[in-house]
Amino acid sequence: MRVMAQMAMVMNLDKCIGCHTCSVTCKQVWTNRQGTEYVWFNNVETLPGQGYPRRWEDQERWKGGWERTRSGRLRLKAGGRAKRLSTIFANPDLPALDDYYEPWTYDYKSLTEAPAGDDLPVARPYSQTSGEPMDTVTWGPNWDDNLGGAPENAPKDPLVQKVGERIRFEFEQSFMFYLPRVCEHCLNPACVSACPSGAMYKRAEDGIVLVDQDRCRGWRMCVSSCPYKKVYFNHATGKAEKCTFCFPRLELGMPTVCAETCVGRMRYLGVMLYDADRVAEAAAVEDEHDLYPAQLEAFLDPRDPAVAAAARASGITEEWLDAARRSPVFDLIRTYQVALPLHPEYRTLPMVWYVPPLSPVVDAVAATGHDGEDAGKLFGAIDTLRIPVEYLAELLTAGDTYAVEAVLRRMAAMRVHMRARNLGEAPDPGIAAAVRLTGDELEEMFRLLAVAKYEDRYVIPSAARADAEALLGEDAACPVGEKPGKPTLLNLSPTRRRSA
Amino acid sequence: MDLLLWGVLPYVVLVLLVAGAIWRGRYDRYGISTHSSQLHESRMLRIGSPLFHFGMAFVVVGHVVGLLIPQSWTDAVGVDDHTYHLLAVSTGAVAGVAAVAGIGILVYRRLKVPAVRRAGLRSDRLMYGVLIGAMLLGLTATILNSAGATGDYDYREGISVWFRSLFAFRPDYALMADTPLAFQLHILFGFALITLIPYSRLIHMFTAPVRYLFRPYVVYRRRDPRRQAQRPLRRGWERVR
């Protein structure tokens, strides 16, 4: 067992209201520069929809992520090392700017400097890459927000195409939800593995995946190899850039900007411990449906004394161990098992997980005039509403509806249980038992998911103490209170100091 | 004059190349990139770029063979003059034409696609000029030489011998005096191009990712707490405003 720590995120999709505050604050902090106009380290997509860049989930086109060879080994979907180096002069899988969108600005000067006249002055759009005027702006960030243009755009969603014909005619009574996306900081990152110059790396302490700007040579292999399309090419500097998980903030114990500013309070940050020896095995399981359980098994329980001992042996500090024990991310992923990975079939073992939204189901039940919080109706709806469940399964479990249904039942059980509580009724213990939890556990889950206090959502160990220990060795120990025997007291009056 | 051009200049070029490369490596790593414009335009690039790069790779190999391998060696393995030149000109022509066609497409693209044009570097104009000049002069010299317009000049007895004498630090510059003008100009443009390598986007050729073939897939790095303190703003980084 080789224990490694990873900062991970869980997003509760049921509570995402699609306000894009995360995207905007992230953009203001990280990508408001020339060369990154089109770059959104954090973006929020409306699903069903094509996403950003358009149809990023179509790996037959972009060749992102890994594939399992017949001999059971992993290979980058774009091919082996030699094959990819032979295409280094023109990457055949690179998305064009149009697949994201052509960034533009307006000729605002014409508004303020237009001479007085009968007609209102107009500001024309200008491309920010070519500087030329644009006749028609045809695509932009969140162009299909809230299913805008869905009859035309949403059928091109690769997941809709996978789920099949049926989803299209149900659009009228359709379901919709938001998917905020950041870099997944994968355990088996395809971008890092594809980088020819070795500029991309995974930090050993917290698993954050970064690009060394001094070593990047702009070969663009990471951009196409990331199946989530979360590495971007800065066209001004000629370097790759990506979500940094706001590491300067995390190192100080502060949440990422996207999490901090999340209006819906739907993001969770915490430590996950995993067994590095099991990563390769978990990423290479034969059946795609086994990828989620395999990754779940690669995680380690920090409350297990054997794990804690192994973690200490691998140099993980007490502060990090403690944070791992209190990790809300661990609770959602392992304890309650309501969070699922995004597209595990890419075999990168992503570390930003999602609690699937129950709302499409609740809405569908309510739309038929039934009680959206009735246990029987909700459970029945989860079983019969095939399309939202199948769609979510394509997104979160490589198409395995069993795990998605199990999560949705737990969410439904929590909803029903808490309604009984709020109405002063005795909750039916059978409901909790039906999802193999206790009433108390459902209430804990409710506190974490619905009440979602700031200090419960973000449990972030700082890097400062570990740094101090690394720099000073044992001298880094706090002089106050940790010495055995007589405690050292500070701020004593002179008289008491003399007598002490 | 001959001494300056063929006896001194080569070493000036070498010094500028090495000094520039060391300077970029030490003070401007952030500036070293392919500065790819594939994001803006892919259709032409996917034809032009491999044509140019692979063509150039063969051209470079051809130059190395032609300049470094003495005639006596090829004679010794039984390759006579006629066969040698037939081989050299035929393979060289294919590679050279591919490279010229490639750079033609790339420059056309650079000039005609507005976003690509705007993404160019300041050093690009000079670099493209020198590069294309060197390539066309090289082709011209080869054509003239093969067509017999340069008398019976054999570069393997002239330029190659002079070139190898450079490495012995006893440049035989007199040999270059009666080299045909086309070859002389080609060499001077070549010098200019080599000088430009560290000061233009050409520097990316020195960062060819050969080591990628041998390293493990996932790279792990540890934070070094001694390097966490703020460091002075380095070349190329945008200032915080």
Image (spheres, coloured by chain):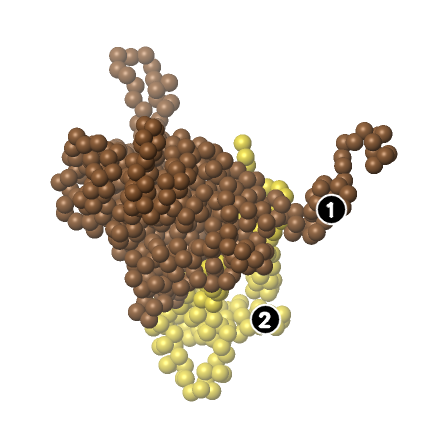
- Counting the numbered discs, the total is 2
- The amino acid sitting under disc 1 is Lys
Give the image location of residue A424, x and y in percent.
Answer: 34, 28
Graded by Cα atoms within 10 Å as few (under 14), some (14 to 19) or many (20 or more), the crowding at tag 2 reads few
Give the image location of residue A45, x and y in percent.
Answer: 31, 39
Image-based side of B225 in relation to B43, left or right: right
Measured in 3D between alpha carbons, the distance from the residue under mark 1 to the one under mark 2, in whole angstroms, is 69 Å
Residue with the mark numbered 1: A483
Give the image location of residue A357, x and y in percent.
Answer: 30, 40
Please, is residue A393 above or below residue A152 in the view?
Answer: below
Q: Which chain does the brown colour mark? A: A
Residue with the mark numbered 2: B167
Image-based side of A383 in relation to B202, left or right: left
- The amino acid sitting under disc 2 is Phe
Image-based side of A455 in relation to A78, left or right: right
Query: What's the chain of the residue with tag 2?
Result: B
Colour of chain B, in one word, is: yellow
Q: Residue at x 32, y 27 (%)?
A: A423
Out of A305 and A159, give the one closest to the viewer.
Answer: A305
Query: What's the chain of the residue with tag 1?
Result: A
**What element does badge 1 sit on?**
loop
Out of A286 and A300, give the one closest to the viewer.
Answer: A300
Out of B75 and A71, give the one closest to the viewer.
Answer: A71
